[in-house]
Image: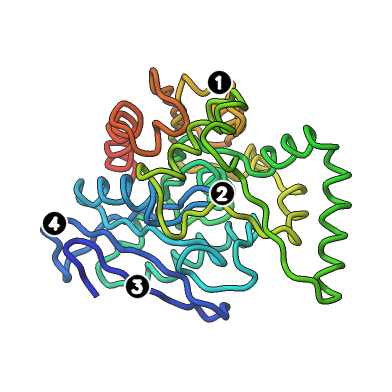
Amino acid sequence: MATGTVRHTTFRNRDMYWDIAADIHVPADFDESGSYPTIVVAHPIGSCKEQTSGSIYAPALAEAGYVAIAFDASFQGASGGEPRFLEDPNQRVEDFSRVVDFAVTLPYVDAGRIGVLGICGGGGYTWAAAKTEKRFRAVVSITGANFGNLQRNMAAQNGGVLEALRGISQQRTAEARGADSATNGFLPETAEAAQATGDIDIIEAFDYYRTERGQAEHGCVLFEAAHGTTALGWDAFDLADQLLDQPLLVVVGDEDKQGAFGAFTDGHTLFDLAASTDKQILEVPGASHYDLYDQPHGAGEALKAVIPFFGEKL
């Protein structure tokens, strides 16, 4: 059903046992019989389509003349799948192809002009998806983070990766024997606790996800615990030097050099690795990781580069 310039939908492909929920943002002068370049827009880890992907980037792309499909990852948001809050990089990457499979059935989507944009962990998944999903003709990451690196770095500060793997295995065994499932929260419980970390990403994550600024029903930043081994063994950079050959724009904030999520470093690493001969990196002056989610001097500046990039490459 259309509501203004947003169409709320769910779909299920032949290889799926659950629905994916998506918001299709269309231009104000949308013509059902037209043919539009289309951008698949992926939300951050622990987020949902009602936050930055669908509240900032997809509407701006639609205003610029694109169809933009902001979707909830499987097992998260309004999408189906059990267990809930599963953050499995392999499933997250496969979701991109599932969305493209849906998009190419829409008569107004130009199947030869499909791009992809992802934010934070969604940006890292965007890199990984584009390595093998060649229906994506142009690729953009906004403060993209390699979730595997992030998980390994966090584990290293709390007993080590091997210890984390053993702990997850114990939880999985307990659940197989009937124990309740467990979730891990990604953020401190209070603003004061976030401030006490001294880390810009943690402090601003609390401000985004736990206040009116970005709070949303499904943007709960929870992660199912028993299947966390997959992320610890996953790497968004793997084979990027051979397979990531599409035109590429990497956007990072120059105030995020020391943030816990590692997006500044990850963006530069991916840029250097990518096989693409047509690639750009943009450091937005004065912008932090979360400025690139919703702030005029962050996301607003990023969009000044993103929109013409897609205009040229699609």
- The earlier-in-sequence mark between 4 and 3 is 3
Q: Residue under circle 2?
A: 125
Judge by depth and name the residue closer to the eye, 250 or 147: 147
Is residue 311 depicted above or below 88 in this figure?
above
Judge by depth and name the residue closer to the eye, 299 or 185: 185
Judge by depth and name the residue closer to the eye, 220 or 129: 220
Q: Residue under circle 4?
A: 28
Q: Residue under circle 3?
A: 9
Q: Amino acid at mark 4?
A: Ala
Tell me the crowding category of disc 1: few under 14, some 14 to 19, or many 20 or more residues within 10 angstroms, Cα based: some
Q: Amino acid at mark 3?
A: Thr
Q: Position of residue 47 (x, y in %)?
A: 48, 52
Q: Is residue 62 left or right of residue 133?
A: left
What residue sits 23% from the left and 52% below the top? 62
Disc 3 to disc 2, C-alpha distance: 22 Å
Q: Secondary structure at mark 2?
A: helix
Q: Are marks 4 and 3 in contact (CB under 8 Å)?
A: no
Q: Are marks 2 and 4 in contact (CB under 8 Å)?
A: no
Say which mark, if any, is on residue 257.
1
Viewer-side label of 1, 4: 1
Disc 1 to disc 3, C-alpha distance: 38 Å
Judge by depth and name the residue closer to the eye, 256 or 159: 159
Disc 4 to disc 3, C-alpha distance: 18 Å
Q: Amino acid at mark 1?
A: Lys
Tell me the crowding category of disc 2: few under 14, some 14 to 19, or many 20 or more residues within 10 angstroms, Cα based: many
